[in-house]
Image (tube, rainbow, N blue to C red):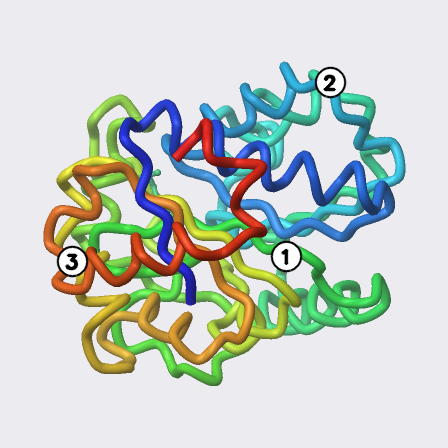
Amino acid sequence: MEVLVCKTREKAVALTARIIEKRLRAKPASVLGMATGRTMEEVYTNLVQSGVSFAQTTTFNLDEYVGLLAEDPNSYASYMRHHLFDHVDIDLTKTHLPDGMAEDLRAAAQAYEAEITKAGGIDLQLLGIGETGHIGFNEPFSALRSRTRDKVLTPATRQQNAECFGGDINKVPVRAVTMGVETILEARELLLLACGSAKANMIAKAIEGPLCAAITASALQIHQNCVVVLDEQAAAELMQREYFDLVIANENKWDEYRDLI
Ligand code: GLP
């Protein structure tokens, strides 16, 4: 794992977007794993502004709420259209989200996994982190070998996401379909972005703590090609900060990104 700490939130967001942009320019037919949440909104804004083409790109989102129609303004399907798909040249038939309206959620989740496999697997998976330490909607105690399935959300996660539902936790669905931890780990490259002091404690635990199902983001420690991008606030509780900075300073591959670090 490489940990990149940027001076500001704006730089962390711009760096994340630039990494994605570079991958797309190098391989326009990339398979991208998409994430949602407020942090990602700015990443998508940057990507739209970059002008990079998505014409050949295939996407798979991490998760979707159970019981919300794709047209519902709070569905992640709407989120993706609003923040990215409506503003780029992507072929919508190449975009995928888990089906939270399926009668048989389990069968739909398995079909989603099959679609990912058929597309050749995910090249780059974008990730945020929830305040419970989740990736996707893999809440605490999700199996580290879990596959795409539906999960019950914790009250903490529903509270964190309530803002998008007019501040009313009762309007936030109780369940969601999410790629599993193992599904996520199968992506060839992982890129996690976290900003702000509310994420600092979970980031330190996920990066430097023990590998454990109680914090599913800790599973990233076993991935061979994982980059974590943070702003100063999100990095505030890291104990190995100096070493992480030293690694980045001595890796030539980051030279082209130094203006954003
Ligand atoms: C939701 C998503 C997660 C994401 C998290 C971060 O819970 N299911 O995949 O990591 O939001 O949200 P934010 O960026 O709003 O803090």
Tag 1 near tag 3, CB within 8 Å: no
From the top left corner, tell me how far across and down residue 51 is, in percent: 73, 18
Label number found at residue 238: 3
Element on which disc 3 rests: loop
Q: CA distance from mark 2 to mark 3?
A: 35 Å
The residue pinned by badge 2 equals: 51
Question: If you read the primary sequence from the N terminus, does the residue marked by circle 1 or circle 2 appear first?
Answer: 2
Tag 2 near tag 3, CB within 8 Å: no
Q: Is mark 2 within 8 Å of ligand 1?
A: no
Residue type highlighted by circle 1: Ala
| Residue count near mark 1 (Cα–Cα under 10 Å), binned few <14, some 14–19, many ≥20 | few
Residue shown at the point (58%, 51%) measured from the top left: 253
| Residue count near mark 3 (Cα–Cα under 10 Å), binned few <14, some 14–19, many ≥20 | some
Does 221 sit above or below residue 196?
below
Location of the N terminus by quadrant is: bottom left
Image quadrant assignment for residue 86: top right
Residue shown at the point (22%, 40%) measured from the top left: 160
Question: If you read the primary sequence from the N terminus, does the residue marked by circle 2 or circle 3 appear first?
Answer: 2
Location of the C terminus by quadrant is: top left
The residue pinned by badge 1 equals: 102
- Report the image quarter containing ligand 1: top left
- Please give the count of numbered marks on the rendered protein: 3
Residue type highlighted by circle 2: Gly
Element on which disc 2 rests: loop
Does 57 sit above or below residue 204?
above
Element on which disc 1 rests: loop
